[in-house]
Image (spheres, helix red, strand yellow):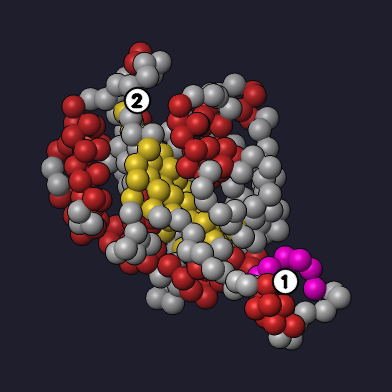
Amino acid sequence: MHRKDFIKYITAIPLLSKSMTLTQLANHLPNTTTMPVLFLGHGSPMNAIEENEFVQGFRNCAVNIPKPKAILCVSAHWETNGTQVTAMEHPKTIHDFGGFPKALFDVEYPAPGSKWLAEETKKTITTKKISFDETWGLDHGAWSVIKHLYPKADVPIIQLSLDYNLTPQQHFDLASQLKSLRNKGVLIIGSGNIVHNLGLVAWDKLQEKEYGYDWALEVNTKIKSFIEAEDFKSLANYKNLGKAFQLAIPTPEHYLPLLYTLALKDKKETISFFNDKAIGGSLTMTSLKIT
């Protein structure tokens, strides 16, 4: 936006007054850039406090992203009966795990919430009732990775829950309604893991930089090929793709955030993969960026 157009625009805002906050003013300004979309393979909560190649990958993916007005995160760790969005001003940092060092439980990520984005999300999704939540906060699927993108915790965040009553295709269709938020300064992040079977983790191999069972590598490769071909129907139909997929995705919650991100892709956009490694045999950290 040119300077004279900016001046013309703000003088036309009827709500502009001495009492208007900078946040309120920002919410009235038009956006000139379509925000990217991210899927982050979040892996272990320890990635919140460790220094490794995956953490560096999270940081690198944010380098060329315009700073968002707000973030909408779909995390594997918030499943609900019905679809909800967090709508509190100050979401708490949820330590939804056990058996880890005290240093991890001491981490706080005090990013503000965004009632504006919660209302925009509810208004944007027209095919389903969306409820406001005032109790949840930010689970580790959100804060453990977002803290590496925005370490100052200065970007407002809301979470959108996963309704466990929906089919994968219904999740995809719901997510596609969120596209307009990308043109309002909103960075949408899905956080999960493409391959995620904790019951079959090779705990003795976790310290290796890369280790994946044959079936895990097979599924990770096939899913990337479906993504590159934009064969989203097959991705939503993953339960019928054979034994390897059943092992790789025994439960849907870590996989579904991937569908939320892919549903937001426009035809002209490209997808780049990063952190594309398997660890512990049955987990993949594969992440992607849509621009």
Which residue: 59% across, 21% down? 101
Q: Is residue 50 left or right of residue 216?
A: right
What type is the residue that disc 1 sits on?
A: Leu
Residue 21 falls within the magenta-colored stretch: yes
> Closer to the N terminus: mark 2 or mark 1?
1
View extreme (right): residue:
18
Q: Is-magenta flag for residue 25?
A: yes
Position of residue 271 measured from the top left corner of the image (x, y, whole percent): 33, 50
Residue 168 badge: none
Is there any visible trace of residue 76 in the rendered image? no
Q: CA distance from mark 2 to mark 1?
A: 45 Å
Pointer 2 with pointer 1, Cβ within 8 A: no
**Residue sitting at 48 percent across and 74 percent down?**
124
What residue is drawn where x is 59% and y is 65%?
Answer: 117
Give left or right: position of 198 versus 135.
Answer: left
Q: Check disc 2 and report the residue beneath it.
A: 279
Q: Which residues are magenta?
A: 20-28
Q: Relative to 243, is 145 on the left or the right?
A: right
Q: Is residue 93 above or below residue 212?
A: below
Q: Main secondary structure of the magenta part?
A: helix
In this rendered view, identify the residue nearer to me: 67 or 243.
Answer: 67
Q: Which residue is mark 1?
A: 25
Report the front residue among 54 and 131: 54
From the viewer's perspective, is the residue at label 2 or at label 1 nearer?
Answer: 1
Rendered view: 206 above or below 35: above
Structural crowding at the residue carrying mark 1, measured as other residues with C-alpha within 10 Å and reported as few (<14), some (14–19) or many (≥20):
some
Q: Which amino acid is tagged 2?
A: Ile
